[in-house]
């Protein structure tokens, strides 16, 4: 049976989604502007399991701009909408504040609670440091299929980013600029410190060998500090993402680490740049299953296939 949800909006700051019966806050969507060096943008933190365990990290000492679950753009036509140091080929990571931009909240078109779920639809603008509008985004976040019996709930994140410049927007990553195995950009999850050295599971394999590879979903399981037990997060491509590029779209590849920290991103510009023409729209949709326990592959496959898009 799907659990009832409650939604609280602290205007100008954040929205909070809570399970009505247990009082567990499943997520907090923060849209207030924060430190300019960290490329201000909305993010989800904390993200919790149904038992109340936090499964995101926030401003860790190694990367202060890592904030829970957020949409990022590490290399965007010379700008850094990821935050912190910028990667420069042959020189490494440099402090270049003039490159660090932002994604700004422009308004909500929908904030609603319905049978079995919550929906947030938001308008955002993307900016380089100078403040020009480079892109507009329509973002939708759905919280749904909250199943106490299975110990799992689902979040679906949809983003449609439209190029508002008169020239192409070039999405890249440190790897497209010369650094191996650093293809992060797009939707990015940073796990809590306790999840370091966690277990990575894919449909046909597992472990660090998934870095830079493709699959329709990828799971990460970690063990909590301060409470007994594990949690599993499953990151799933929507079928229309065409993550392999076989249908003519731009391919996606997984950025995933268990060490020195836990992180997952279905990167849309890992090995090659993605070029978005003026007026064109880049659309991506992902699902994140948040579960209590250390799930095995068979259970993950069943859960992924059991939730239609």
Image (tube, rainbow, N blue to C red):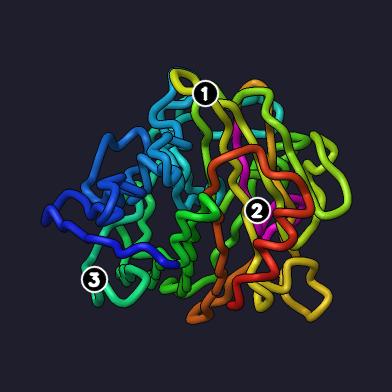
User: Answer yes or no: do the residues labelled 2 and 3 have beta carbons within 8 Å?
Assistant: no
In the image, is 190 to the left or to the right of 257? Answer: left
Label ID, residue 228 = 1
| Neighbours of disc 2 within 10 Å: few (<14), some (14-19), many (20+) | many
On screen, residue 147 versus residue 229, left or right, reads left
Which is more N-terminal, label 3 or label 2?
A: 3
Write down the region rendered in magenta. Answer: 262-274
Sooner in the amino-acid sequence: mark 1 or mark 3: 3
The image shows residue 95, relative to residue 105, as above or below, that is above
Of badges 1 and 3, nearer the viewer stands 1
Q: Residue at x 61, y 31 (%)?
A: 222
Numbered disc in front, either 2 or 3: 3
Mark 1 vs 3: CB contact within 8 A: no
Residue 307 lies, with reference to residue 223, above or below; the image says below
- Location of residue 132 with respect to 64 vertically, above or below: below
> In percent of the image, x 30 and y 54: which residue is there?
19
Query: What percent of the width, then of the height, locates residue 94?
Result: 53, 25
Identify the residue under disc 2: 267
Which residue extends farthest left? 11
Look at 55% across and 74% down and name the residue there: 283
Tell me the number on the disc at residue 111. Answer: 3
Measured from the top left, where is residue 119 in percent x and y?
33, 70
Task: Name the foreground residue: 45 vs 234.
Answer: 234
Q: Seen in the image, is 39 located left or right of residue 75?
A: left
Are there few (<14), some (14-19), or many (20+) residues within 10 Å of tag 1? Answer: few
């Amino acid at each position: 049976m799907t659990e009832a949800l409650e939604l609280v909006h602290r205007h100008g700051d954040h929205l909070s989604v809570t399970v009505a019966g247990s009082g567990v806050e499943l997520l907090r969507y923060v849209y207030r502007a924060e430190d300019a060096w960290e490329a201000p943008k909305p993010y989800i933190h904390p993200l919790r399991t149904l038992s109340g365990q936090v499964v995101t990290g926030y401003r860790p000492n190694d990367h202060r701009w890592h904030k829970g679950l957020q949409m990022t753009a590490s290399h965007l036509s010379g700008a850094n909408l990821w935050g912190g140091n910028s990667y420069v080929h042959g020189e490494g990571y440099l402090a270049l504040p003039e490159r660090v931009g932002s994604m700004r909240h422009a308004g909500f078109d929908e904030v609603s609670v319905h049978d079995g779920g919550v929906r947030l639809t938001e308008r955002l603008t993307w900016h380089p440091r100078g403040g020009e509008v480079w892109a507009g985004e329509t973002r939708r976040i759905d919280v749904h299929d909250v199943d106490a019996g299975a110990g799992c709930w689902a979040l679906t994140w949809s983003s449609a980013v439209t190029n508002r410049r008169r020239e192409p927007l070039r999405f890249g990553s440190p790897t497209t600029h010369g650094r191996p195995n650093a293809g992060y950009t797009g939707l990015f999850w940073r796990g809590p410190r306790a999840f370091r050295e966690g277990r990575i599971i894919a449909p046909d394999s597992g472990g660090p060998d998934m870095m830079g590879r493709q699959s329709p979903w990828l799971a990460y399981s970690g063990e909590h500090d301060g409470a007994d037990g594990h949690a599993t997060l499953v990151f799933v491509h929507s079928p229309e993402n065409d993550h392999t590029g076989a249908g003519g779209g731009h391919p996606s590849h997984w950025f995933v680490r268990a060490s020195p920290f836990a992180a997952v991103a279905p990167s849309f510009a890992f090995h090659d740049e993605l070029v978005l023409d003026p007026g064109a729209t880049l659309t991506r949709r992902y699902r994140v299953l948040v579960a209590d326990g250390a799930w095995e592959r068979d259970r993950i496959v069943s859960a992924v296939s059991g939730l239609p898009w």
